[in-house]
Image: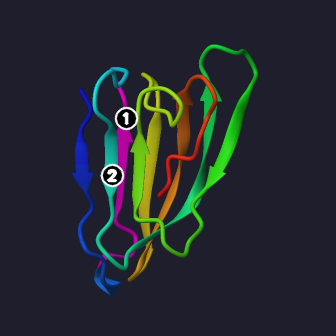
Amino acid sequence: AGLDFTLPALATAQIGTHYTFFVTVTVTSNNFRVTAQAGDLLAGALWIDDFDTASTGAYFAADGSDDLVLTMNGSTSGGKKGTWVEFTATSATQWFVRGVVFGDGTLVTPFS
């Protein structure tokens, strides 16, 4: 089953705070979702490796203007076993996201 995580609100004192999430069991129902607080935007990017097709994948970047949520559904937006994603507070209003995500099918951005 999926999980929902809400990141803490950012302030200057939190710069450098980081969280790393490891997916040890593929998401098979619901979503694996990480949500930032209103005004704490996501920046950075992820590589999603296509689990079924060797040596293929896609690069997706947060737009840095309105993305607050990373959602992995266990297939097209990632969330298969082996996925890892890190969130680092780089300012009082921004989380930098990086990681390697495993998905499958027609890959889509996990950022919204």
Instruction: Report the amino acid beneath label 1.
Output: Phe
| Quadrant assignment, res 51 | top right
Give residue 79's mark: none
Q: Residues within 10 Å of mark 1 (few under 14, many from 20)?
A: some
Q: Which residues are magenta?
A: 14-24
Tell me residue 56's x, y (percent).
74, 25
Residue pictured at 33% horizontal, 38% vertical: 32
Residue lying furthest right in this view?
A: 55
Q: Mark 1: which secondary structure?
A: strand
Q: Which residue is mark 1?
A: 22
| Quadrant assignment, res 85 | top left
Disc 1 to disc 2: CB gap under 8 Å: no
Q: Does the magenta segment cover residue 95?
A: no
From the viewer's perspective, is residue 68 above or below residue 47?
A: below
Residue 87 relative to residue 96: left or right: left
From the viewer's perspective, is residue 23 above or below residue 47?
A: above
Give residue 34's mark: 2
Tell me residue 87's x, y (percent).
42, 57
Residue pictured at 37% horizontal, 47% vertical: 20
